[in-house]
Amino acid sequence: MNTLRVVLLIGLFMSITFGYGQQRLPQSQPPFNPVAGVDEIMKSIVDPLAWTVFRSVGTIMTEQRIEEIAPKNDGEWEAVRSAAMGLAEGGNLLMFESRTSDKEPDWITMSQQLIRRSLDAAEAAKTKDAEKLLIVGGDVYEVCESCHLLYMKFETWQRWRWKR
């Protein structure tokens, strides 16, 4: 009986060991196929997602009243969280080699900051913390503006800025 247990345990151990080893074989990653330039990524992905985050919280003051703006239900909070997550991935898209070849090293630094700040915004939305979202949304805005001041032509920046 003990011999049978030992044989079964050895068989089980070998099955687990060899099965695990097969799952860990390196797999080649499919090649990336970037299809958009920086301008298209900004217009189609980064800009709309960023403005979803920026406009999600705030205060409007008039002579008649003060209105606090914040997501009102789970769906609105999730929309802000999703926008912030997409914005973080937008930071990754901006670091593809084909999009960095003509940029200074600070392009990568700012893209990484966009990712970090966007993840902070996603966490604030996940925890439904409007005050934190206001602060980290401002941090995201500062990263965006820093990059625009360095990499956008002034006339383009002015047109873009006043469109909002």
Image (tube, rainbow, N blue to C red):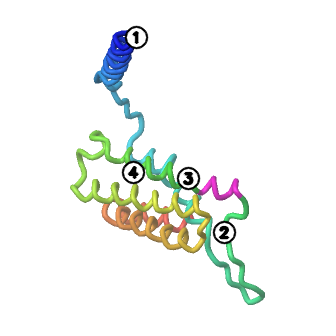
Query: Residue at image x 54%, y 68%?
Result: 133
Measured Cα–Cα span from mark 4 to mark 1 = 62 Å
Measured Cα–Cα span from mark 2 to mark 3 = 15 Å
Measured Cα–Cα span from mark 2 to mark 1 = 69 Å
Measured Cα–Cα span from mark 3 to mark 4 = 13 Å
Q: Earlier in the sequence, mark 2 or mark 3?
A: 2
> Mark 4 — residue?
91
Mark 1 surroundings within 10 Å by alpha-carbon count, few (fewer than 14), some (14 through 19), many (20 or more): few
Direction front: furthest residue: 1
* 147, above or below 90, in the image: below
Residue type at numbered disc 3? Ala
> Mark 2 — residue?
70
Evaluate if marks 4 and 2 touch, with contact meaning CB atoms under 8 Å apart. no
Q: Which residues are magenta?
A: 74-80
> Mark 3 — residue?
83
Evaluate if marks 2 and 3 touch, with contact meaning CB atoms under 8 Å apart. no
> Mark 1 — residue?
1
Residue type at numbered disc 1? Met
Q: Nearer the viewer, residue 41 or 95?
A: 95
Measured Cα–Cα span from mark 1 to mark 3 = 62 Å
Q: Earlier in the sequence, mark 4 or mark 2?
A: 2
Query: Residue at image x 50%, y 62%?
Result: 121
Q: Secondary structure at mark 3?
A: helix
**Closer to the eye: label 4 or 2:** 2
Q: Secondary structure at mark 1?
A: loop
Residue type at numbered disc 2? Ala
* 116, above or below 61, in the image: above
Query: Residue at image x 39%, y 65%?
Result: 143
Residue type at numbered disc 4? Gly
